[in-house]
Amino acid sequence: MSNWNSYSPADLPEAVVKKAVQMGADDVVVTSGIDDTKQIRFANNSITTSKSWASTGLSIYLTKDKRILSTQVNELSEIDRTLDELMKRIKMMQPNEEYGGIYSGKPKFRKNVAEPTVAAMVEELFVHVDAAISSAQEAGASRVAGVLYSSSGEMHQATSGGSIGTYGSSSLEISVRAMSDAESSGHMVQSVTSPMNFEPARVGRTAGELAIESRNPEIGKEGKFDVVFSPMIFANIMERVGSSCSAGSVDAGMSFFTDMIGKKVASEKFTCYDDATNPESLDSLPFDEEGAPTGKTSLIEKGILKTYLHNTSTAKRYGTVSTGNAGLVFPSPWTTCLEPGQDTRDQLISQVNDGYYMTNTWYTRFQNYQTGDFSTIPRDAIFHIKNGKLDKPVKDIRISENMLNILKNVKAVGNDPMQVHWWEVETPVFVPHVLVENVNITKSTQ
Amino acid sequence: MDARLELDRDLATMAVDKALDQGAEYAEARMESFVTNGLFLKNGNPEIAGFGTFSGMCVRVLVKGGVGFASTDILKKDNVLNRAETAVKMAKASASLVKDRIVLSDEPTHIADYAVEQKKKIVDVGLDDIVEVLTHIDKAMTESAPLASRFIQLRMEERTKFFANSDDSKIGSRIPRIAIFTIPTIKDGDKISQAMIQRGMAMGWEYMDPVNRSEEICHEIAMTHKNMKEGVKAPTGKIDMVLGPEVVGIAAHESCGHPYEADRISGREAAQAGESFVNAKMMGSRIGSSVASVVDDPTLENSYGFYLYDDEGVKARPKILIKDGMINEFLHNRETSAVMDMGQSNAGARANNYDREAIVRMSNTFVSPGDHNDEELFEGIKLGVYMKNFMEWNIDDKRYNQRYIGREAYLIENGQVKGPVKAPILELTTPAFWNAIDAVGKKLEFSAATCGKGEPGQGIPVYTGGPHIRLKDITLGVSN
């Protein structure tokens, strides 16, 4: 019986790894975390609930003869029993013949600590919410809804490959949707890792302005149109680009980039990468889930697909090296970034004679993940573009398209990237405005 | 009961008392413990198995119209009391900025305990049993059609809950749930199709009979393959349609259940799950034809969305959302029933875990059976399409514009079901959908699904369902 209470949070994972190896495990990854997250939700200009989550946990990933198990433990007193259970159960598992081990090495990882003021915030959070609501109302919105998060945490990881990492992080996020009437709304978000950069009033004002500008929309037309996408809406496309680059997605039939390495998958204007090094991103850990160093990985360069995202196992099968994107089961992107271009938003709009400017979307759903056939429903402020200028607001249209068509029809990329992470976009994305030609628009038949 | 699932119920009452001591006008504690087991099989390879025992508690309080919520994943006295204090602190901080004071409906006190019986308990299932069943299903799948890739995910849990509030309600439950999910990619020549298949129930391990589950899944794959290979272009212009229970179920869920959620109608979900084209003034007005009725019923035994008391301690009952084509009832929790002056909640409050707030959710939502035999639905259709199930679907956040693309679909000519048609698109408004129904079948069927809503997102187990229905004069879209 070990005295797990005697270990500091930073030393505990390594001690558990050692114990598991002594018990006969081959590869072991142990990650512990403590997190303090607060949330304030608001709707109809008023706060609807305020929450506080105190989370702790220890996750254990363990292999023996290519048999793989994982579990979590919330209480230190359960660690011994859990390790016994893991070693007992693993005998009942069948080997994963595609398993290729985990990263081996002792790299030095960059350090980061959580901003201490974030965890201490309580009253300030309500002041931020009040600022967002007031600014949206001052811009003309009649009703304002949204959510604010503060998050602060620390994680420690040790692996049987020798990797030991510690990382602290904190963030503030706000999402504001402003309504001016039953048919007109605007939505804006912001996610920051430094409280100095947090601008809830600007976010509220932008949402309010979009709500006012989109009043009295008319039902849009169906057909093929050039579309200027705002970062909020194109982030939905980019998130799927990132996940489709995972070798795990390719293997499972969930990628529209299957068998396309080295091939043209997008227009020459389209260059994107996965980035775990940007301190402004919500997801920028220096080590991945098997302890490998993370970095910046070029995914698509001038339209050509360069690589999939890998962990050690998928890299071995594909004859390459890990990109530092484990996911012990599925490699996954950290932060998907679209390389900015030269044009401002207005310059993109000026290139469209008859098309749409879309500022948000909802429910991107696939008919077939491998072919990339999908549809999504633009919402909030949508505008008709006529002769290079924003014209009347529009409603009730749907994009019914194919992901590869969208990427190949990118005509120009804007110069104004922003981080998008909210209810509809779970993996952080840095993306500017984007102009896409010949986008298929449909609408309800009756 | 398995020791891992036992809860020290005194902790919940201590938390409620602590919150009241700190100034809460109302307090509730929901504690949960659950055992999970799962396996992920990719292309026949057992990628990873997961298991765990989890427990925790949330405390929700009301102070001067402000709501505070705090949770912990450590069920020890100090943690629980700290969380009760924190919930009150959050509520007090919020109360000064609350413009619309939050009120909860008055509800009767309930003292109850209930459990779903299992022939073979989830907690007793060995990993070797799970591997064996999934391997059997996987092998059968590969024999049902040419597959380029596939994965199967099995997840099951047995969960105990104990709810206590300052109205003296004390409710315990124990519910097992088991579900299997797979996406096979069918490739034949240059044609590729996918089927997203989910099955699940509130039941023990006996549900995972390998022969029955294999037959269900393989039939879907074989039919998808046939449809992909032989499907011809669907007819254009105005036609009649017959929809299978799977399509009827998702339409009932998406275009009736969601827009009738009172928190959407009142605007609480505006920045997340969205609002609704329905408003409170539309209660009692016509939304569909006189043969269209929709029910949400959490009390169906062994259903995937089963519960007898909701997560606010309100006793569950069936809710008739559309009755004979008229808007009849919304889905409520205690907050929305107070906002809409309903008197009492109809027990629609659910949370998917102890660290999530209970919000308005569906349970088992379905079109009520009618009086037609399935064969009668096809009779008299000169030209039409039978959409048996769907692949892509979506609907806007007000639930007004909906779209379903058929996966398995057939031409109907002169009352007879003919050969397959490829990917017909039903894209129409919600009133148009419900008004187009002119006949409803007798035989009710359900599908298991996971409904997403809330911030942070809460996937919640539900059934969607209905019998076959017939739609008149529909304009179909066709895939490019």
Image (cartoon, rainbow, N blue to C red):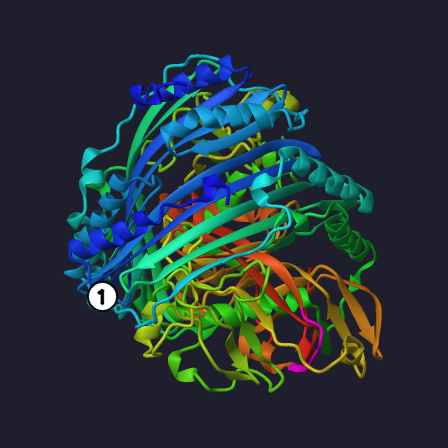
Q: Is residue B85 visible?
A: yes
Q: Which chain does tag 1 point to?
A: A
Image label count: 1
Residue A286 lies, in percent from the top left, at: 39, 25
Which residues make up the magenta segment?
B437-444
Position of residue B321 in the picture relative to residue A344 (left or right): right
**Which quadrant of the figure has residue B66?**
bottom left
Picture layout, residue A306 above or below residue A367: above
Residue A65 drawn in magenta = no
Residue situated in front as seen by the camera: A244 or B41: B41
Position of residue B118 in the picture relative to residue B69 (left or right): right
Picture layout, residue A24 above or below residue B385: above
**Which quadrant of the figure has residue B387?**
bottom right
Residue situated in front as seen by the camera: A400 or B456: B456
User: For mark 1, what is the residue?
Assistant: A137
Q: Is residue A338 visible?
A: no
Is disc 1 surrounded by few (<14), some (14 to 19) or many (20+) residues within 10 Å?
Answer: many
Picture layout, residue A234 above or below residue B233: above
Picture layout, residue A89 above or below residue A15: below
- Residue at 75% of width from left, 51% of height from top? B212
Q: Quadrant of the C terminus of chain B?
A: bottom right
